[in-house]
Image (cartoon, rainbow, N blue to C red):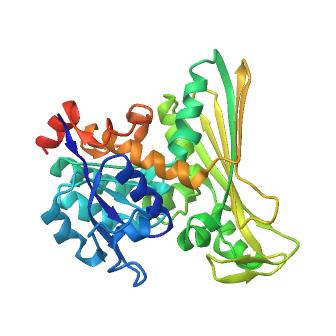
Amino acid sequence: MGRKLRIAQYGCGNMSAFIMRYAIEKGAEIVCAFGRSSRSIGKDIGEIAGVGKTGVLVQDSKDALAILKEKKPDACVIATASLMQDLERPFMDCAESGVNAITLCEEAFYPWNSAPQTTRMLDELARKQGVTLCGSGYQDVFWGNLVAVIAGATHRITKITGRSSYNVEDYGLALAKVHGAGLSLAEFEREIAAADNISATQRAALIEQEAFLPSYMWSSNGWLASRLGLTVREQTQKCVPQTHNEELRSETLQMTIPAGYATGMSAMVTTTTEEGITIEGQCIGKVYAEGDFDQNVWTIHGEPDTEVIINRPATVELTCATIVNRIPDLIAAEPGFTTTEKMPSARFHAKGQNLSLEGRDATNAAFR
């Protein structure tokens, strides 16, 4: 008979409320939680998750390393930021403590093509410590495995195109800023769009220096190419501001965005491969106006053509549920920075049968 999984939560903002509630409802035990904001530090995680008092209080993330070493959870969920440069410390805290870690950080979904040095360093550390680090979330299923499964029913593929939209208000301040929400068009051009007006050689140099700012589809296109066994020849991206003809209030930014200013951006990533298959992925993240809604559309062009359209996906909830459902895969995976295209497809776990250690998961955990 298995035992409950013991989980740490690193970052206690908007998304963590769903993550912690889902984990608790699936039978896991949250043994510690960390935050940086005075709004969360000292608060019972049950208040954040809406499940009632638990006795587990959010502690300052600067103390995470010592607490993780003491508590020794089976896994830690990191929900703090969208870029690898901001995840280095949390990942290192987990690896150095001998704790597996999974994050909803979008770049961490496939960071090999945008933050190679940091990823290699974390991979070596994780292997040495016998733990697994990875990124997951909405894109794991809806930009990755969904497309890969449909590709498995296709005879010949010439191109894969995808478009996904989401409301940046749902994901917190860090994501809204990365999308340029609230910037004037001149500021957007200077701070975001200009970074893509470079040659392939310049881009490669920036990537090696980890000075390149990838959009979310940058990571997903790399993941999908790897999952399908494709060899990437070149990958480019173009970021275009999204605007609205009236002012829009953003509670996340705590500002009213003037009419004509950037409400977010559209990022188009184009990947060409040696096999002749092109992947074009577009993500549109912005502050929604009345009538806007999330949408996920993927088309495989070839023999035959296949299109999948998902209107109004509950993107926040799907992101958090995927993270929780991935935890057993995280624990069972090979040590290192092991991206999820090397794991089985994310799978549903019914209450009472999932978030416990038994069988292969228990054996792997016991030897770490």
| Residue drawn where x is 65% and y is 18% of the image | 156
Task: Point out residue 215 in the picture as x, y percentages from the top left corner.
Answer: 59, 57
Looking at the image, residue 294 sits to the left or right of residue 56; the answer is right
Identity of the residue furthest to the right in this view: 245
Q: Is residue 328 above or below residue 69?
A: above
Q: Is residue 301 above or below residue 124?
A: above
Identity of the residue furthest to the top in this view: 155
Task: Point out residue 278 in the picture as x, y percentages from the top left corner.
Answer: 66, 34
Q: Is residue 334 visible?
A: no
Q: Quadrant of residue 341?
A: top left
| Residue drawn where x is 17% and y is 55% of the image | 98
Identity of the residue furthest to the front in this view: 52
Instruction: Please state the total of marks drawn on the protein image.
Output: 0
Q: Is residue 295 above or below residue 182?
A: above
Task: Report the front residue among 108 and 38.
Answer: 38
- Give the quarter of the figure containing the N terminus: top left
| Residue drawn where x is 27% and y is 69% of the image | 56
Task: Point out residue 366 in the picture as x, y percentages from the top left corner.
Answer: 12, 42
| Residue drawn where x is 28% and y is 38% of the image | 333
Looking at the image, residue 220 sits to the left or right of residue 338; the answer is right
Task: Report the front residue among 25 and 261.
Answer: 25
Looking at the image, residue 261 sits to the left or right of residue 318; the answer is right
Task: Point out residue 342 in the picture as x, y percentages from the top left corner.
Answer: 38, 34
Q: Is residue 77 visible?
A: yes
- Give the quarter of the figure containing the C terminus: top left
